[in-house]
Amino acid sequence: MDATLRLKDPIAPQLVQVLRQAIIAVELRPGEALSEKEIAGRFGVSRQPVREAFIKLAEAGLVQVLPSRGTYVMKISMRAVANARFVREAVECAIARAATTLITPAQVARLRALIEGQRNAAALDDHAGFSVLDEDFHQLLAEIVDCDYAGRVVEGARAQTDRVRYLSLPGASPAPLLISQHVAIVDAIEARDADGAETQMRKHLREILNALPRIAHDHPELFEDEIMPEHTRTLHIP
C-alpha cells in the first residue's frame, strides 16, 4: 500500500482509491482490522479524511464499520460479486451498442492503445497494472457514449468484481484471454456492429462466472459464502 497523497487535493477520495486498490490486490486481507490512527499516521493526515474514506468503502461493500468495535475488510461475497456482474452486463452491453454509432477513429486508437498496454503489463506479470488498464478500458467506453451516470454505475459495481478479477490472474482467467475479448469488443464497435459488440461484451463480462467457483475453492478463507444467485447460475454464454 505504497502511495503518496497530493496534499493540495482532497485527501479522502485519494485514500478511497489507495485503500480500494489495496483491498482488491489482497494487500489488505478480508477480515483484517483497519485502524484510523495507523492509516492517518502512515499518510501523514488527520483521522477525519480516513474516517470519510472508510464510510465510502463501506458504501461500496468493501469494508464493514462496526460502532465501538472497529472497521474490517469485508470478505468476498459470491452473491455480491454475481449481482454486481449482472448489473455491469446490463449497463455495459448497452454502452457497447451505443458506442458503435458514436465512436471516432481517435477513440478506437485510444482503446487499442490501452489493449497494447495490457499486453505489456501481462508480459511483465504486472497484475496491478493490468487491472488499472482494464478499468481504463471500460471507463473510456462509458466516456465515448457521454453518459457519466453509466460510468459511475460501472465503477461502483467494479468494487466487487475487481476483487475476483485480480485473483483470477493469471490462472482462472488468463490475461491473453481477457485481452482477446477486449480486441473482439473493439473490432465489433469499430465495424459498427451493434449486435456483435453486445455479444462480445456479454461474453467478456460472463467470464468471471467461469473463474468464480475455482477461485472460491482455491481461496476459501477470502470468501464469506458459497451461494450464487439463481439468475447467475442459469446464465449460458451463447
Image (cartoon, rainbow, N blue to C red):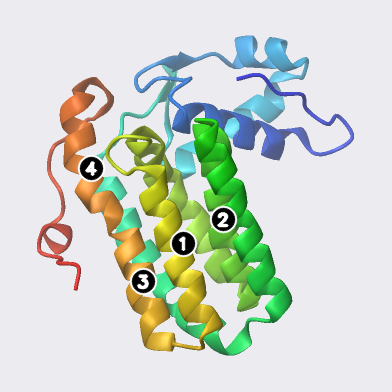
Badge 4 or badge 2: first in the primary sequence: 2
For the residue pair 96 and 7, the one nearer the viewer reads as 96
For the residue pair 89 and 179, the one nearer the viewer reads as 179
Disc 3: which residue? 200
The kind of residue on which mark 1 rests is His
Mark 1 neighbour density, 10 Å: few (under 14) some (14–19) many (20 or more): many
Q: Position of residue 126 (x, y in %)?
A: 54, 31
Mark 1 → mark 3, Cα distance in angstroms:
8 Å
Classify the position of the C terminus by image quarter. bottom left
**Residue 20 seen in render:** no
Quadrant housing residue 108: bottom right
x 55%, y 31%: residue: 124
Q: Are marks 1 and 2 in contact (CB under 8 Å)?
A: yes
Mark 4 → mark 2, Cα distance in angstroms:
24 Å
Of tags 4 and 1, the one toward the viewer is 1
| Residue located farthest toward the right when viewing the structure as drawn | 8
**Residue 146 seen in render:** yes
Find numbered disc 3 in the image and state the secondary structure of the residue it sits on: helix
- Is 209 on the left-hand or right-hand side of 66? left
Q: Relative to residue 129, is residue 7 depicted above or below?
A: above
Badge 1 or badge 3: first in the primary sequence: 1
Mark 3 → mark 4, Cα distance in angstroms:
20 Å
Mark 4 neighbour density, 10 Å: few (under 14) some (14–19) many (20 or more): many
Disc 1: which residue? 182
Mark 1 → mark 2, Cα distance in angstroms:
7 Å
Badge 3 or badge 4: first in the primary sequence: 3
x 42%, y 78%: residue: 197
Of tags 3 and 4, the one toward the viewer is 3
Mark 4 → mark 1, Cα distance in angstroms:
20 Å
Q: Position of residue 112 (x, y in %)?
A: 61, 63
Disc 4: which residue? 212
Q: Position of residue 177 (x, y in %)?
A: 36, 52
